[in-house]
Amino acid sequence: MVELSTMRVFLVAAEEKNFSNAARRLNMSQSAVSQNIRAMEQIYGVELFKRHGRSVVLSDTGEALLPMVREVLRAARLMEDSLQNIKNEIGGELLIGCSTSAGKYLMPALLSMFQEEYPAVHPRVKVMGRENVYERLLNQVIPFGVSSKQFEHRDLETMPIFEDRIFLIVPVNHPWAEYGKAMPDDLLDQKIIMREEMSGTCETVMQGLKSYGITPDMLNVSMELGNPEAIEMAVERGVGIAFVSEMVAARGLALGRIKKVELQGMDLRRMVYMARHVNYPFTRAQNLFWNFAKAQFDKLNTEIWDSLVSFAVAS
């Protein structure tokens, strides 16, 4: 019979599609991951993965087995949760998929607040693309997803948890840096570093510029980067100007490496949402966290802002 620990290795390897990444996530060696997979394949006399260099994909047998492994591990997790309830303890893993730069800074603050009340809970935030968050929520791979897009699906419940502001940042030696103000039309003569088109930041910016008759093709986009921290660093080095989350900008602003510029008439904001699948078999800790996050909306947007900025500066 296959042990739960081996099933866990199989599940993580299937999600990561890479044994090295699975090993890092599980705090194991890559050889230990491979040994667990081989042991499972030998027990059933099947091939679970097809190897393609460093990456792997599930075989047809692996695909068929995956949902059953998920159900077994969920049942085991719920049993452990029930035993903890008997002992009046709240613990277990708290996995969250996050697709926003704001969420990467927001979640540590929110989770640390939650851990103050429930120290036996072990949070894990996995950064991924928005579509991956959506897909994994629908497939019930992750219990919670954080995104700047409000997912609309009958099986998903979504709530706002934070309002993020988008700043225009420029290098300290930029002509706009001293005055700190500009007109939207002034952007047309500037080299701009942008996030990818499907990012929440890019969508918010382009929606705001649309009201001034500015379309994407009118901008001089000198560089497109998928990482908001990399964009902030590029602005520091004078590559161009950029729009980023206030929390991404916090470090550079605090250290005096970049300057914030206000565009007249534009106040760019976006809501950050948390979503969950209504049919996911939540543990007690997961249900408590959902209700905790819902209750913290006002606090996240006011009282703990200083701690969020401090985290951004320290990171």
Image: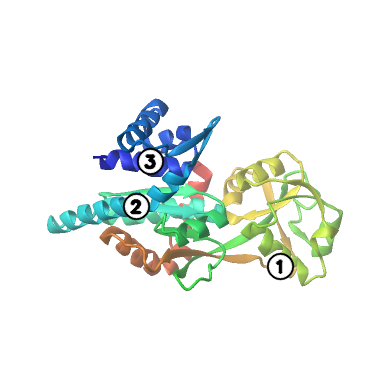
Mark toward the start of the polypeptide (1 vs 2): 2
Residue 183 seen: no
Real-space CA distance between mark 1 and mark 3, rounded to the nearest whole angstrom: 43 Å
Find numbered disc 3 in the image and state the secondary structure of the residue it sits on: helix
Residue 86, horizontal then vertical, whole percent:
13, 58
- Relative to 260, say whether 20 is above or below: above
Quarter of the figure with the N terminus = top left
* Outermost residue, left side: 87
- Relative to 15, say whether 279 is above or below: below
Q: Residue at x 53, y 54 (%)?
A: 132
Q: Which residue is mark 1?
A: 207
Mark toward the start of the polypeptide (2 vs 3): 3
- Foreground tag (1 vs 2): 2
Mark toward the start of the polypeptide (1 vs 3): 3
Residue 58 is left or right of residue 68, and the answer is right
Residue 166 is left or right of residue 121, and the answer is right
Residue 126, horizontal then vertical, whole percent:
46, 48
Evaluate if marks 1 and 3 touch, with contact meaning CB atoms under 8 Å apart. no
- Relative to 252, say whether 218 is above or below: below
Residue 106, horizontal then vertical, whole percent:
47, 55
Instruction: Report the amino acid beneath label 3.
Output: Phe
Nearest the camera: 121 or 309? 121
Instruction: Report the amino acid beneath label 1.
Output: Gln
- Foreground tag (1 vs 3): 3
Q: Which residue is mark 2?
A: 68
Q: Which residue is mark 3?
A: 10
Instruction: Report the amino acid beneath label 2.
Output: Met
Q: Residue at x 39, y 44 (%)?
A: 11
Residue 275 seen: yes
- Relative to 154, say whether 23 is above or below: above
Find numbered disc 2 in the image and state the secondary structure of the residue it sits on: helix
Nearest the camera: 131 or 10? 10
